[in-house]
Amino acid sequence: MGNWKTRTILIGAVLGAAAGLIAAYILVQRAGETQQAPRLNAGDGVKVGLGVLGVLRLISDIGTRK
């Protein structure tokens, strides 16, 4: 794997982990405000999944632009 490929994968992994940590932090903060544990149902999971797919589609479009 080339140097730029490895760097791109590592940057993506770090950004993905950071986004996950921020999302978890927001959930914990909101749960602290309401004094209730967050409850995610199937509908919430579908919304998150579709949002992630949308972001991935945007990223793949950036990679194919000329």
Image: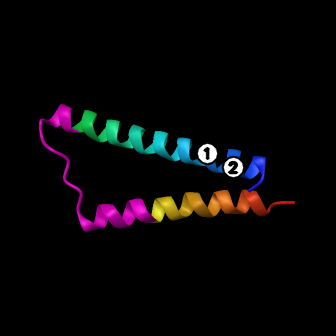
On the picture, is 14 further left or further right than 49? right
On the picture, is 59 further left or further right than 3? left
Residue at the spot 64% in from the left edge and 59% down from the top edge: 58
Where in the figure is residue 9, as x and y percent of width and height?
64, 50
Is-magenta flag for residue 33? yes
Is-magenta flag for residue 5? no
Q: Identify the amino acid type marked 2.
A: Thr
Q: CA distance from mark 2 to mark 1?
A: 6 Å
Where in the figure is residue 54, as x and y percent of width and height?
55, 62
Numbered circle sitting on residue 2: none
On the picture, is 39 further left or further right than 45? left
Asked if 26 appears above or below 62 in the picture, the reply is above
Q: Quadrant of the C terminus?
A: bottom right
Asked if 55 appears above or below 32 in the picture, the reply is below
Identify the residue under disc 1: 10
Asked if 33 appears above or below 50 in the picture, the reply is above
The magenta span reads 31-49
Q: Identify the amino acid type marked 1.
A: Leu
Residue at the spot 68% in from the left edge and 62% down from the top edge: 60
Q: Secondary structure at mark 2?
A: helix
